[in-house]
Image: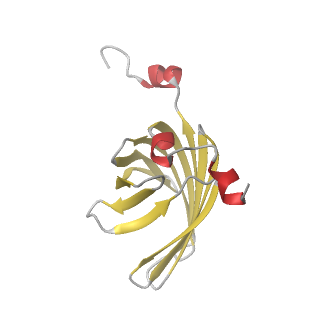
Amino acid sequence: MTEDAADARPWQNIADSLAGDWTVRRTMIDFLAGATYNFTGNAVVTADAFTERGVMQIAAHAMPASRAYRLERRDRSIRILRADGSDFIELEPKATQIVQHHCGADVYAGRFLFRGPDEWAEAWRVKGPRKNYASLSRFRRLDAGDLERAKPLPGN
């Protein structure tokens, strides 16, 4: 069995395996500003969208933060598009994969690590004339109990 075949076994289709609700924790190091930012929030992955919302902590300041992507299913992979429909990256059903994206003169080098159906991480190193940062995000699937605890209490 080839390495690619063995690596693909955990997921028949990566789009199906990512669908659901996730907690997100991210640390970003901005080398231009000399600052570290922390994001905490939730992500929802559906058949055609990835939406993330939470709070970005920058020093003593907390502010709402979000990002959204369109998803386009392929035979076994998933193409990730920016909200305007422009290409971003494509993910395959592999436990570890490296991706790259060019945004003008900025280069995004990413690595995705899927530890199984309920946990994954993405690391980015972004360099260019306008950007110079590294980020590490951890995603953990929310189970039914997590979702129930996250609901607001009646009257709130």
Q: Is residue 23 left or right of residue 105?
A: right
Residue 57 in the image, given as x and y percentages of width and height: 49, 52
Q: Nearer the viewer, residue 107 or 4?
A: 4
Residue 122: image quadrant is bottom right
Q: Is residue 79 left or right of residue 123?
A: left
Tell me what residue is drawn at x 39 percent, y 50 percent: 63
The quadrant of the rendering that contains the N terminus is: bottom right
Q: How many marks?
A: 0
Residue 25 in the image, given as x and y percentages of width and height: 55, 47
Residue 53 in the image, given as x and y percentages of width and height: 39, 45
The quadrant of the rendering that contains the C terminus is: top left
In this figure, which colouring scheme has been used for the structure?
secondary structure
Residue 136 in the image, given as x and y percentages of width and height: 60, 58
Tell me what residue is drawn at x 47 percent, y 55 percent: 77
Q: Is residue 139 left or right of residue 88?
A: right
Q: Nearer the viewer, residue 107 or 31?
A: 107
